[in-house]
Amino acid sequence: MKGTHLGEFEELVLLAVAALHGNAYAVTVKGEIEERASRKVNISAVHSSLYRLEEKGFLESSVGGATNKRGGKSKRLFKVTAYGFKSLKEAQSLRQYFWNIIPQLSTQE
């Protein structure tokens, strides 16, 4: 397993895969991030992140059935592993910890 650090974009990709629950492939992940995060995303960046997250053990993939719409080409479907969910929860916990220790923002004017 390669490094276990989650970058910001990798975390977004992992969250999108989790949200898509069973229908996560590069195009749907791209759409989910663009819609939910209001952020323009390059499809090749999504592909790279999906494969990198799989290499790190956060995701696993399988090949779906071929469709006429895709010219007979199969989709690679991704799902979050138990390790991936654990890492997401740890990232959320760490962020929440820091938000909780920041003094009230209204006093920093």
Image (cartoon, rainbow, N blue to C red):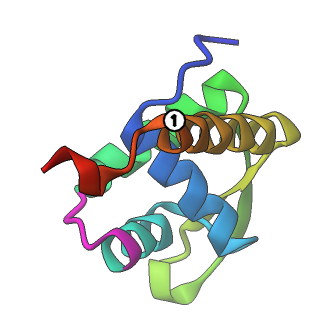
Along the line of sight, which residue is nearer the eye, 7 or 59? 7
Q: Nearer the viewer, residue 88 or 68?
A: 88
Q: Percent x, y for residue 100?
A: 55, 43
User: Dividing the image into 4 quarters, which one contains the N terminus?
Assistant: top right
| Outermost residue to the top | 2
The residue sitting at 67% across, 40% down in the picture is: 93
Instruction: Give me the residue at 61% from left, 60% from top.
Output: 17
Left or right, residue 70 beside residue 91: left
Q: In which quarter of the image is residue 22?
A: bottom right
Residue that lies at the very extreme toward the front in this rendered image: 107
Asked if residue 36 is positioned above or below residue 43 in the image, the reply reads: below
Q: Taking 46 as reference, is 74 above or below it?
A: below
Q: Would you call the spot at circle 1 few (<14 residues within 10 Å), some (14-19), or many (20 or more)?
A: few
* Relative image position of residue 55 (x, y in whole percent): 63, 25
From the image, give the main secondary structure of the stretch colored magenta: loop
Residue in front for this viewpoint, 108 or 62: 108
Q: Could you tell whether 72 is left or right of 105 in the image?
A: right
Q: Does the magenta stretch include residue 39?
A: yes
For residue 75, which quarter of the picture?
A: bottom right
Q: Which of 16 and 46 is in front in this view?
A: 16
Q: Please state if 44 lies on the left or on the right of 87 as rendered.
A: left
At label 1, the amino acid type is Ile
Residue wearing tag 1: 101
Give the extent of the magenta segment.
36-41
Residue positioned 77% across, 45% down in the render: 85
Q: In this view, does 6 lie to the left or right of 45?
A: right
Find the residue positioned furthest to the bottom: 69
Residue 76 seen in render: no
Residue 40, how many percent across, how many down? 19, 65
* Residue 106, horizontal then vertical, whole percent: 27, 57
